[in-house]
Amino acid sequence: MTALIAWGLRNDFAYVNAFIGSVGSSMLAYILPCTFHLVLLKHENSRFTVFKNIVFIVFGVVGGIVGVAITIENMIKSFKQLNG
């Protein structure tokens, strides 16, 4: 599937990788582990641990959104240079 997308997008495949990377990295590094920790150990977590996990989740969401926004901004700049 990735090979077909790479072949179809040829010059713009870097943007696909950047988009998937910004979303996937924030999910795998920050959001999912903390969410699993909150859910699986919900009766054993202290208030500090819950607060810490929520801070990491918010950081991951914000980081993912910023990464996607920067990728979209770079895509728009690139397409404007090609067309204009």
Image (tube, helix red, strand yellow):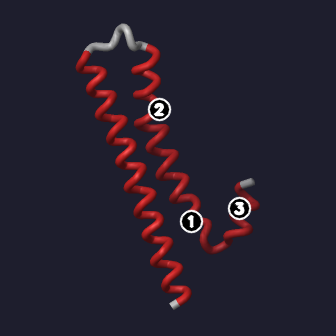
Q: Quadrant of residue 10?
A: bottom right
**Marks 1/2: CA–CA distance:** 25 Å
Identify the residue position indicated by label 3 in the image. Answer: 5
Up-down relation of residue 72 to residue 51 (above or below): below
Q: How many marks on residues?
A: 3
The numbered mark, 3 or 2, whose residue comes first in the sequence reads 3
Please state the horizontal and vertical placement of residue 40, each as a whole percent of the image: 46, 15
Locate residue 56, reporting x and y percent.
33, 35
User: What residue does disc 2 label?
Assistant: 32
Classify mark 3: helix, strand or loop: helix
Query: For the residue carrying disc 1, how many other residues have a C-alpha within 10 Å: few (<14), some (14-19), or many (20+)?
Result: some
Distance of label 3 from label 1 (alpha carbons): 11 Å
Identify the residue at image location x=49%, y=85%: 81
Q: Earlier in the sequence, mark 1 or mark 2?
A: 1
Residue under the point 30% across and 22% down: 50
What amino acid is found at the position of numbered circle 3 in the picture? Ile
Residue depth check, mark 1 versus mark 2: number of the one nearer the observer: 2
Q: Amino acid at mark 2?
A: Leu
User: Element under label 2?
Assistant: helix
Query: With 64 as the anchor, is 3 left or right in this view?
Result: right
Q: Write down the residue under mark 1.
A: 14
